[in-house]
Image (spheres, grey):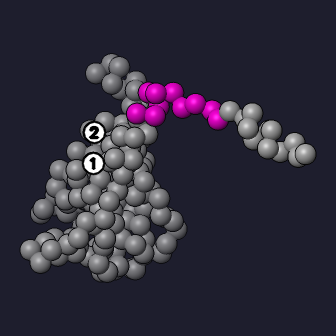
Amino acid sequence: MSILPRIVRDATLPRIPPRTSRRLERIIAMSPRPVETSREDPAVRCPKHDRPMRRFLVAGIEVDRCSICGGIWLDAGELESLVNSDRDARDAARMLDRADASVEHDDHEPICPRDGTPLVAKRDTNKPHVECDACETCSGVFLDAGELSRMTETGFADWVRRLFA
């Protein structure tokens, strides 16, 4: 008689606390889902590669992501919506921002996929270590791989800033 069935029978699986379980369910519900592009709103092209980006729905916001470099295009107001959303929505958005940031970009100047104007490099005043490319005409933003995660994470400095605000 083998001892293995008794060990398996007697083993107890760790229980996930109900609060954690509900949070995981919310993150899964908000997780990125592919969205089909339409004729009225065709696929956005990557500002750095000029290739079609794939559209995802994350926490009610349509996010365009380049499958080559992992860069993310957000239309006007979408970045603020993600940054100011609850923790679960930010965690769901970070699922998209997992590409290899070491991919080399073309040497040409990034162009806005909505209106064709050159993008301007800008730093967030609250997160000066994060630089993004912004369109001054349509207010869209292009984030290289990893920048969305860095922009939406809350660090000690953010906590202190909110404490004394």
Of the residues under marks 2 and 1, which one precedes in the sequence? Answer: 1
Q: Quadrant of the N terminus?
A: top right
- Amino acid type of the residue that numbered disc 2 sits on in the rendered structure: Ser
Query: In this orientation, which residue lies closer to the viewer: 20 or 87?
Result: 20
For this rendering, which residue is in front, 2 or 42?
2
- Residue type at mark 1? Ala
Q: Is residue 117 left or right of residue 160?
A: left
In the displayed structure image, the side of residue 71 where residue 75 appears, left or right: left
Image location of residue 148, percent across then percent down: 37, 52
- Give the distance between the C-alpha atoms of the residues marked 2 and 1, in whole angstroms: 9 Å
Q: Residue furthest top?
A: 164
Q: Which region of the structure is painted magenta? A: 13-22
Q: Residue at x 41, y 67 (%)?
A: 70
Query: Which residue is located at x 80 percent, y 38 percent?
Result: 7
Q: Which mark is residue 85?
A: 2
User: Which of the pair 98/101 is nearer the observer?
Assistant: 98
Which residue sits furthest front? Answer: 1
Q: Secondary structure at mark 2?
A: loop
Give the residue furthest to the left: 40
Between 21 and 136, the residue placed more toward the observer is 21
Q: Residue at x 35, y 19 (%)?
A: 163
On residue 59, the disc is 1
Say the numbered circle drawn on residue 83: none
- Mark nearer the viewer, 2 or 1: 1
Counting other residues with Cα less than 10 Å from the Cα at mark 2, is it few (<14), some (14-19), or many (20 or more)? Answer: some
* Location of residue 87 in the rendering, given as x and y in whole percent from the top left corner: 36, 37
Query: From the image, which quarter does the C terminus lie in?
Result: top left
Q: Position of residue 90 (x, y in %)?
A: 35, 44
